[in-house]
Structure formats: C-alpha cells, structure tokens
C-alpha cells in the first residue's frame, strides 16, 4: 500500500484534513483551486451568497459535464469498435 500524506485543504471557507497518496496530492489541490474559482464565478454571475446554493450549482455543472463526457466516450468507443470490426472483415 502506498504511503499517504496528511494535507489540509480549504473549500468554501472550511478546512478539510485528508490523507492522500503523493500522486493524488497535486490532483486534489488542483480540484480545490477549480472549486474555489467556480465558487467566485457563480457568486458573481448569479449574485448568490448562500454557499449551499453555490455548491449545488457547481455539483449540477459537474454532473452535467460528466454525463456529457460519458455519453461521448460511449459513442467514441462504438465508432472505434465498428472500425476495428470493419478492418477485421477485410481479411
């Protein structure tokens, strides 16, 4: 098992202690930066001050984007599978 390091991150003004692998740490910190930036954007764009509402909108954005990416990935895999099948039939 990989060694884990203890880090503290601040999201929406709250501190969270985490244990992550050294490889995960950079990704977690980038995610925190992304979330903090989205909080600022949504607060300004929609003039929302309630952090729960802001967080809900961020979650909705991310879930929607994830759904789109999964759907596109599924279509891309199908296109690749179809191409491979076509190539295998050429023999």
Image (cartoon, rainbow, N blue to C red):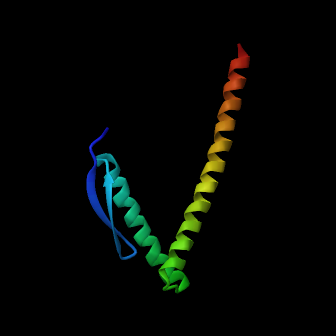
Quarter in which the C terminus is drawn: top right
Report the label total. 0
Quarter in which the N terminus is drawn: top left
Q: Nearer the viewer, residue 16 or 69?
A: 16
- Does 21 appear above or below 59? above
Residue plotted at (31% across, 47% down): 21
Residue 60 x/y as whole percent = 59, 67
Residue furthest to the top in view is 91
Residue plotted at (62% across, 49% down): 70
Rendering quarter of residue 3? top left
Q: Nearer the viewer, residue 39 or 86?
A: 39
Residue 26 x/y as whole percent = 32, 54
Residue 72 x/y as whole percent = 64, 48
Q: Report the side of 35 relative to 22 (left or right).
A: right
Rendering quarter of residue 6? bottom left
Residue plotted at (55% across, 62% down): 62
């Amino acid at each position: 098992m990989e060694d884990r390091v203890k880090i503290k991150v601040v999201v929406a003004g709250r501190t969270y202690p985490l244990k992550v692998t050294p490889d995960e740490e950079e990704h977690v910190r980038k995610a925190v930066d992304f979330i903090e930036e989205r909080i600022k954007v949504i607060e300004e764009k929609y003039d929302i001050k309630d952090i729960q509402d802001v967080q809900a909108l961020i979650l909705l954005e991310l879930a929607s984007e994830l759904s789109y990416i999964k759907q596109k990935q599924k279509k891309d895999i199908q296109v690749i599978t179809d191409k491979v099948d076509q190539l295998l039939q050429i023999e």
